[in-house]
Image (tube, grey):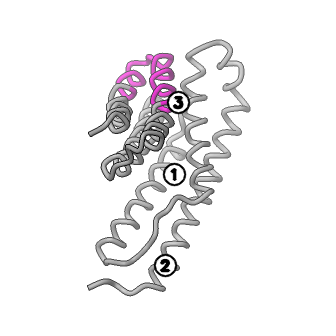
């Protein structure tokens, strides 16, 4: 266990705190916890690479912490009525479909690569921006000016498009790779 892994664990522990804050209608504080968690994501990666602290634990824990935070925030914002149910279902279903595909490939011992695609990275940035925008409306008047109305609507449209595009791209990639490989022994 090293400092980069501790930073990642901190982000993982931010998940229940953020849920609690959103459900308690303390969205301004939840915004700042979300922002700090986002900064920690960049920081743990930088520390791991800069000081040669990359570990298998960190490589596994980092994407788990990222997805746990994002999915939890979406589900909680949807539950609290700040995001539409259909969008929350779309975002969560995409992540579970990708995870299900990875587990299926592993179960069938297929040699399928699940490296992040460019559209997936764009989708993640869009999802983060939308969550931050929704929470940011309550954090300051300045942020509220930029994140209400059409700004939020445009972010929701971007998240919808990139989520569908990314999910479809992973499905196509998985299907192509699964057809071209033979199950392992």
Asked if the magenta segment contains residue 38, the reply would be: yes
Mark 2 to mark 3: distance in Å?
Answer: 38 Å
| Residue 180 as seen in the image, left or right of residue 68 | right
Quarter of the figure with the N terminus:
top left
**Who comes first in sequence, dot 2 or dot 3?**
3
Q: Is residue 163 above or below residue 150?
A: below
- Of circles 2 and 3, the one toward us is 2
- Of circles 2 and 1, the one toward us is 2
Element class at badge 3: loop
Provide the residue designation for mark 3: 82
Give the residue at x 45% y 30%: 37
Residue 87, given in percent of the width and then of the height, sits at 54, 45
Q: Is residue 172 above or below residue 56?
A: below
Q: Main secondary structure of the magenta part?
A: helix
Provide the residue designation for mark 1: 90
**Marks 1 & 3, CB-CB < 8 Å contact:** no
Q: Which mark is residue 177?
A: 2
Mark 1 to mark 3: distance in Å?
Answer: 15 Å
Mark 2 to mark 1: distance in Å?
Answer: 24 Å
**Marks 2 & 1, CB-CB < 8 Å contact:** no
Asked if the magenta segment contains residue 34, the reply would be: yes
Magenta stretch in the rendered image: 18-39
């Amino acid at each position: 266990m090293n400092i980069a892994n501790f930073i990642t664990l901190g982000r993982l522990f931010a998940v229940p705190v953020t849920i609690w804050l959103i459900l308690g209608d303390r969205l301004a504080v939840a915004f700042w916890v979300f922002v700090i968690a986002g900064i920690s994501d960049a920081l743990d990666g930088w520390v791991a690479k800069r000081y040669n602290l990359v570990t298998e634990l960190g490589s596994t824990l980092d994407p788990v912490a990222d997805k746990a935070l994002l999915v939890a925030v979406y589900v909680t914002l949807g539950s609290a009525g700040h995001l539409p149910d259909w969008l929350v279902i779309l975002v969560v279903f995409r992540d579970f479909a990708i995870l299900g595909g990875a587990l299926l490939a592993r179960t069938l011992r297929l040699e399928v690569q699940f490296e992040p695609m460019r559209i997936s990275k764009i989708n993640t940035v869009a999802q983060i921006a939308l969550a931050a925008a929704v929470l940011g409306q309550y954090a300051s008047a300045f942020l509220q000016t930029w994140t209400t109305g059409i700004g939020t609507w445009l972010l929701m449209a971007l998240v919808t498009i990139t989520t569908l595009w990314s999910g479809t791209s992973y499905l196509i990639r998985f299907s192509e790779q699964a057809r071209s490989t033979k199950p392992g022994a």
